[in-house]
Image (tube, grey):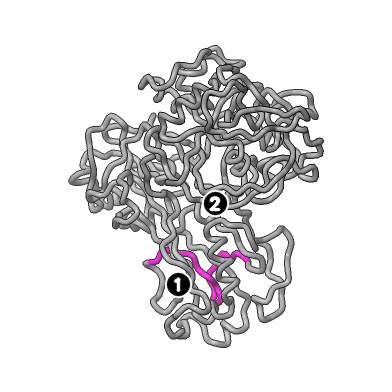
Amino acid sequence: MKRFHFVGLFVLVGLLLAGCASPAQPQSPQASAAETDNCAIDVWVAPEVPARIRENFVLPAGLRWVGTRGPCSVTLGLEAFRAPEEQLIAQISWDYALAAPAWSFREGASSVDIRFVWEGKPRGSLMQITQLLIYAEDYNSLLGLLGEPGKDETLSDLISLVPNEKNNLSDQLGASVWAIVPLSRIQADYRVLAIDGISPLQEDFAQQAYALRGIYSLYANPAITARLGEENLRSLVQGLFGEREGAQAGQAQDTQLSSTGETAPQPERQPSPTISLSERVRLKDGAVEILIPAGTFTFGCVAEHNGGYDCADDELPARQINLGAYYIDKYEVTNRQYALCAAEGACPEPVYRYSATRSSYYGNPEYDDYPAANVSWTDAAAYCAWAGGRLPTEAEWEKAARGTGLRAFPWGDTPPSCSKANAKDELNGSSCVGDTLPVGSLAEGASPYGVMDMAGNVWEWVQDWYVLDKDGIRINLDPLEENLDFYKVVKGGSWDYAWSRLRIAYNSDHDPDAHKLSFGFRCAAPVD
């Protein structure tokens, strides 16, 4: 498969830890030695840091968030604002793209002209622009990159803020209406423009200087980094990239980070459930793929982490499996995406164009962002091959849903609810919705890696064959073996099945050519 750059987060600089060569540590001009020796260490995130980076910064135990930077603050902010004497701990980047409608003939624009549009004075390559769309959550970040939009520091009439929850802006784009969006929110029906000749879609993009890339540094007074020490610095950097090891566990803990002996308060906001924001956009269909790191995890059913249900024979035995790194789709494949494959003749049209409660579903723009359903394993496999990947193996699917810990459901061991999964509510004897929801609608149900809808909405085909021995235990066959005369596996439950089917370990077997109203899928791809 052709390899493309990561989007969203890209590590630029490693830790400055004890044992590594480091320059002399000058005293920060912002604080005296007495101040840095006697105050509790905290973390301040500057307002220009993108919302996604802020939300996924998992605070290590013993530290607290603060709203105002102090003499003992570890700061996350634009590298351009870091004083030379402040010691760099790590860096992270975030890229934006300039997007036009898919039918536009334009190839690119000048970064200087983008700044003029931002100031409300379109010129040059962007003379025709009458409106520039940006997500509301990106405004402060773009202020940091492009500066104040006007001399009076007010929002230019050309800049329009759109709701963060609106996934696709293509219905608003036009010849004179373009958008600046994060790379992770690029859609297949956008035309992504080069800026100063550099396109986010080129393979060496990450190595190129780019006008809409923000470099955000984690840094502190050298005296503070010395107090933190190697282990705490490492935990900070892991937290910056969303890793939970050593992070807040939900209760206050004693800490050595404060010389006063006080326990640091809990963070004022909760981090998102995402562990890793290593994401990229698949160019074929605009799907966002999440990198699942290599390593060992528990596959199968563990009774103590099974939602109070018994483990079925075909979910046993639980065992450790080591997987290499791979990508998996963040969302289930949508009707809009599937239609792209069908239009090229690589996928058959769905057997049914309706859903459980909608006479017109597939092909209806109102449901473009809903999961493709009525799809057989054969159809799903054809789509993933067209998109440049394949269906995930059952092990890959379970790791993306469970992470490296133990849990019954993607969100943990707490019971299901309609705010976490679109399924049948066993307590009330009714369905949450009675049909599909738009992909990614239920943020509370995200997996530890930030993969959405792995419980409910639609069943998801995986690569594996379903074969049992005489005792009802699954026989391990190579998932990639072709043309075996067995059924294939679906995972995750759906809108028309009960809570118990949402368990990560649960599996169901079906004919590879079966089409059902609640059958969908997502794709995966190995790391080349």
The mark nearer the N terminus, 2 or 1, is 1
Q: Residue 166: x and y, percent?
A: 48, 36
Residue at 58 percent of width and 38 percent of height: 452
User: Mark 2: which secondary structure?
Assistant: loop
Picture mark count: 2
Tell me where the magenta segment starts and ends, as one range. Answer: 64-79
Circle 2 packing at 10 Å, graded few (<14), some (14-19), many (20+), is few
Residue at the spot 45% in from the left edge and 72% down from the top edge: 88
Q: Quadrant of residue 268?
A: bottom right
Question: Which residue type does callout 2 highlight?
Answer: Ala
Say whether residue 321 is left or right of residue 142.
Answer: right
Mark 1 highlights which residue?
88
Residue 427: quadrant of the picture = top right
Residue 272 lies, in percent from the top left, at 59, 50
- Distance between the Cα atoms at labels 2 and 1? 28 Å
Q: Mark 2 — residue? A: 294
